[in-house]
Image (cartoon, helix red, strand yellow):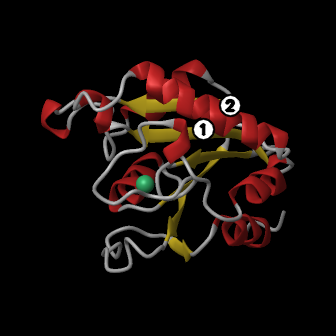
Amino acid sequence: MDNKGFCLLLDRDGVINELLPGAYVTTPDAFVFRNGVIEGLAKLTGVCNYFFIVTNQQGIGKGLMTEGDLEAIHTKMLTAIVAGGGKIDGIYHCPHLASDHCSCRKPSDGMVRRLFADFPDAARQALLLIGDGAVDLSLGSKVGASCYGMRHQHNVSEDWSDFPHREVSDFFQFAERVLSEHRL
Ligand SMILES: [Mg+2]
């Protein structure tokens, strides 16, 4: 019997919080939730078994913030998500520079392989992914996720035609589309 549930992989910048073009979120004050995220995560909590954030944070490698700074930002984020009725099971970040050629920086799939090792049951779920960049959609197609691309003012002209995806323009709309498209 197929009793698979869903595991949602979330990009962070530009999906959960407002993107700072050309800059990094290095303090909790600079972390601003995008519209509909808290409500959308709460709406999906009943239908997705797992929620993981998978995020490139090159600002650490550049020395613009520390691991501790990132942790403070994520504490603020998680507090608000949980207070709103949502949950996040794990946050995986890549601190490396693009020039490091590591195996975790998206579009590489190292962070997803690590979370599957940490949460073997998550690997057995049907995967959904939401991101606002080609690197996210590329990662999603690598790991066999149903992909959703978040369009916003800073990525309107990005070409995603290489990757199968559905487009959404805010997180609550994403949550509603997941519910309707998967007949949940
Ligand atoms: Mg992003």
Q: CA distance from mark 1 to mark 2?
A: 6 Å
Specify whether residue 87 is in view. no
Q: How many marks?
A: 2
Look at the picture and state if 120 lies above or below 123: above
Task: Identify the amino acid type marked 1.
Answer: Phe
Left or right: residue 75 versus residue 42 is left
Mark 2 crowdedness (10 Å alpha carbons): few <14, some 14-19, many ≥20? few
Q: Where is residue 99 drawn, in percent x and y?
A: 13, 36
Q: Could you say which quadrant of the image residue 166 lies in?
A: bottom right
Residue identified by numbered label 1: 52
Label 1–label 2 contact, CB within 8 A: yes
Q: Nearer the viewer, residue 137 or 164?
A: 137
Task: Dividing the image into four quarters, tell me where ligand 1 lies.
Answer: bottom left
Q: Is residue 67 left or right of residue 129?
A: left
- Residue 40, relative to residue 46: is it above or below? below
Question: Which residue is at 47% across, 73% downward?
Answer: 152
Is residue 108 shown left or right of residue 82? left
- Mark 2 falls on what kind of element? loop
Residue occupied by mark 2: 89
